[in-house]
Amino acid sequence: MLEQQMPLFLLQSSLFPLLLFFLFSLPFLFKWLFPTKTTTTTEKTLPPSPPRLPIIGNLHQLGLYPHRSLLSLANHHGRHLMMIHLGSSPAVVVSSAAAAREVMKTHDLVFANRPEFRINRKLLYDLKDVSVAPYGEYWRQLKSIFMLQLLSNKRVQSNRAVREEETALMMKFESSSSSPTLLNLSEKFAELTNDVACRAAFGKKYRVGERGEKFQRLLRDFVGLLGGFDIGDFIPWLGWVSCVNGRNAEVNRVAKELDEFLDGVVQEHMESGGEGKEDFVDTMLRIQKDNKLSISIDRDSIKALLLDVFAGGTDTTATVLEWAMTQLMRTPRVMKKLQDEIRGIAQGKPNITEDDLEKFHYLKAVLKETLRLHPPVPLPIPREASQDITVMGYHIAAKTIVIINAWAIGRDPASWENPEEFWPERFLNSSIDFKGHDFELIPFGAGRRGCPGISFAMATNEIVLANLVHKFDWKVPNGLKGEDLDMTESTGLTIHRKVPLLAVATPRPVF
């Protein structure tokens, strides 16, 4: 018996469980330190990798800001491709445009799948949404519906009035006084983007009143959990930790309460019989009723798609606006140049409409530069290799997780001159765009699993930013200068400013 072989003081000591753990771990530690080499006819070259610890691998090196930590590791171990180990799961990190092109274009089909994470399965209706559904016929048809019925250019244009009305409401509220006003722009952007998405998807806003306030809290919790970490995904025998620390309970609560809210919204639409202008919920219910697809679209599929609308179309859009205004206030030269462009073309018009947007070349450059430096999701949803494959001379085994570091790629000195500088002029005579064809700039990803909502998001970003700089002059509060703004990032799936953006707006007289 083990107890009979141990001194009494060890049995009574709090160190005894640790000693037991150490003894049982010795075989694994020995295997890790002295791996058995197998003879193969062809030696397989793996991507370079930093040293790792037993059991946890490189998890301890990710830190609070994984996009920054992974770039630092890549600079030392593999600037194009680097292998790390997340517990028992191998992962390849992509940190250059050349490697991103290989993964998301040359071998896009091989990397079209998503790794399965327990939080995603629970929150996203057993993976029935577009963002994390397994690659296959269900996903293809669902994405086609999503694109055609909500995110096609025609549909985006049909929601033009919604964007213009919500932007005008925000501007009217803020310009009610002719004196300077201190604003929390982070809060205003979150409210506006949520209202636009609600009207496009639900046909009305859900922000005020008890029900609306609860929905806003649930969305914040939902996005926070999606950006969280479940140790059981990478070290399965430690899955119990999520029970002890309360994460499982929190995931279950948010999933249940969001489901109740969305179920109520769907039920309202069913009972109304599609009266008035058809919104996205009406469209999905009609498709479900027609039953002309080769896949099954049930009520959970509709609710999962609605969560995609809010996860991908509100928080990320608000984040881009937040960082764009931050950079403009830090760089007065750029702010003035943008205001001169917009005010010069507007010729005294009180409001900028979407008819004007194509004329604003510098505005588009400002937004591209913002997306380069501040992709709202710096590490887009990971991919997974569906088979063994060789990329850039390195062997990547099936089931390997693939992490694209869009943040690192946007700051790669091999692609960008003075990459840390906010300099929109770099895009004025450049054909590089963010739509997934130019791998130096992939804030929305690329290939089959690229974000389908680019047009929807950018239409909102352009109309809001254009009106803000047209109608107001902006200063940092408390007499501070732009360079004094705190640039610390938040943590999570979407990278906001850690500190809300406060700004003093002075309405500009329209002549």
Image (cartoon, rainbow, N blue to C red):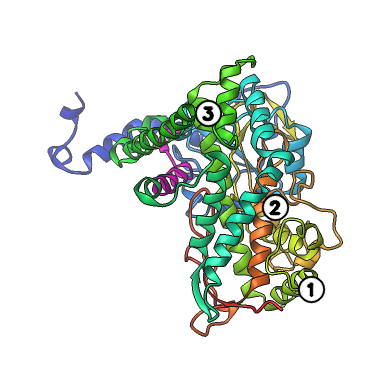
How crowded pointer 3 is (Cα within 10 Å; few <14, some 14-19, many 20+) is rated as many
How crowded pointer 2 is (Cα within 10 Å; few <14, some 14-19, many 20+) is rated as many
Query: What's the residue type where badge 1 is placed?
Result: Gly
**Sequence-wise first label, 3 or 1:** 3
Task: Confirm whether the magenta stretch covers residue 222.
Answer: yes
Quarter where residue 366 is shown: bottom right
Camera-nearest residue between 172 and 212: 172
Q: How many marks?
A: 3
Tag shown at residue 131: none
Name the residue carrying label 3: 302
Name the residue carrying label 2: 409
On screen, residue 114 above or below 187: above
Q: In the displayed structure, does residue 218 sit left or right of residue 138?
A: left
The stretch in magenta equals: 215-235
Quarter where residue 123 is shown: top left
Residue 212, given in percent of the width and then of the height, sits at: 40, 47
- Is the N terminus in the top left, top right, bottom left or bottom right quadrant? top left
